[in-house]
Amino acid sequence: MTERWLYGPFTCPISYQKLNTHSWSKDGTLYAYALSQSGSDWCYAKVRNVATGEDFSEKIEWLKFTGLSFTHDDMGFFYQRLPEPVGTEDAGTETGANKNAMVSRCETFLKS
């Protein structure tokens, strides 16, 4: 087996992004990670197929102060997100209280 970077300074698409949190599926075939940009508390999550090194196309946005945790059967993962801001041109720059946080389960990456 050839070693390669799964994620790191040589694979990050934008240099001012920070790895906020991450999680491996129990069987090690999926890697979920959340990135924040320019020092923001807001981040988005992606899931990478470990075998191919490719990300799935789905992007989970409006995450803040979240963790990522795969279910015991690897059929999805849990995360916390906030409702998408409405009526603000600079969404994500507001400094008020974060209300209506939701814990969700992503099942987009189901294995057949």
Image (cartoon, rainbow, N blue to C red):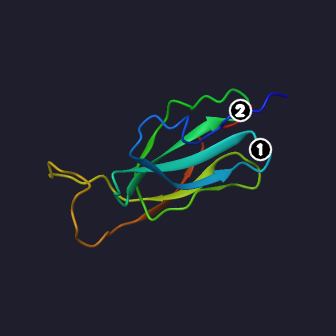
Q: Earlier in the sequence, mark 1 or mark 2?
A: 2
Residue type at mark 1: give it. Answer: Gly
**Dot label at residue 46:** none
Residue 87 horizontal/vertical position (percent):
15, 51
Q: Is residue 8 above or below residue 57?
A: below
**Dot label at residue 28:** 1
Q: Is residue 79 above or below residue 112?
A: below
Residue 53 horizontal/vertical position (percent):
65, 30
* Outermost residue toward the right in this view: 1
Residue 44 horizontal/vertical position (percent):
43, 48
**Dot label at residue 4:** 2
Residue type at mark 2: give it. Answer: Arg
The tally of labels here is 2
Density class for disc 2 (Cα within 10 Å; few <14, some 14-19, many ≥20) is: few
Instruction: Select label 1 or label 2 by which is in front.
Output: 2
CA gap between label 1 and label 2 equals 15 Å
Front residue of 47/99: it is 47
Residue at image coords 41%, 41%: 15
* Outermost residue toward the bottom in this view: 97
